[in-house]
Image (cartoon, rainbow, N blue to C red):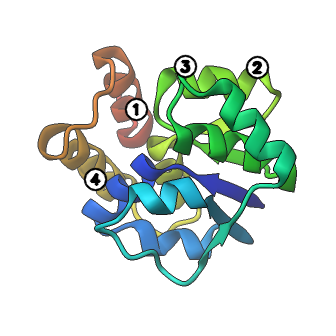
Amino acid sequence: MKIVLNNSPIIFLSKIDCLKLLADCFDEIVTPDAVVYELFEYTLPEFIKICSLSAKGTAYVQGALGQLHRGELEVIALAKEIAADYVVLDDLLARREAKRMAIGVIGTVGLLLILEKRNLLSAEQIWQKIRQLTEQHGMYLVPQLLQQIKNQLLGLH
């Protein structure tokens, strides 16, 4: 499975020490140049490949700037170009644009749930990581979604 990462999942997963676990979940993990530029204080692990857009992808980004950030647009364009299975975006507008372009979308929480499904972390550990993100690192999740995730992970009803 091939994914294209935006900057917020990279930052969030780095903050909770989970970024390195992605290498055990996906065949190919890529990110575009604009995301690397936005991550100036972060060093990407070697398993994340940096890819440049084609001329057509660059033209799409230039034409769409304004409604989304350059990094988000490059993630979407790159996913189309390399036929990625998913883009990993947290921003709602960016997610909507990717879906409009028929690209599979997951977010940081979706990646954490994959780690649990692959038995890399327990459900309780994933719940603690999500709590860290929302309580200490500024990730916003709608309260109903947060409760739904908690119920799913911890078997509550």
Who comes first in sequence, dot 2 or dot 3?
A: 3
Amino acid, disc 2: Arg
Query: Which mark, by number, is residue 3?
Result: none
- Is 108 placed left or right of 57 in the picture? left
Q: Residues within 10 Å of mark 3 (few under 14, many from 20)?
A: few
Q: Answer above or below: position of 2 versus 9.
A: below
Q: Answer above or below: position of 77 versus 15.
A: above
Q: State the residue position of label 4.
A: 129
Q: State the residue position of label 1.
A: 149
Amino acid, disc 3: Gln
Q: Answer above or below: position of 90 versus 55.
A: above
Whole-percent x, y for residue 141 in the image: 32, 26
Q: State the residue position of label 2.
A: 100
Who comes first in sequence, dot 3 or dot 4?
A: 3
- Secondary structure under badge 4? helix
Q: Residues within 10 Å of mark 2 (few under 14, many from 20)?
A: few
Amino acid, disc 1: Ile
- The C terminus lies in quadrant: top left
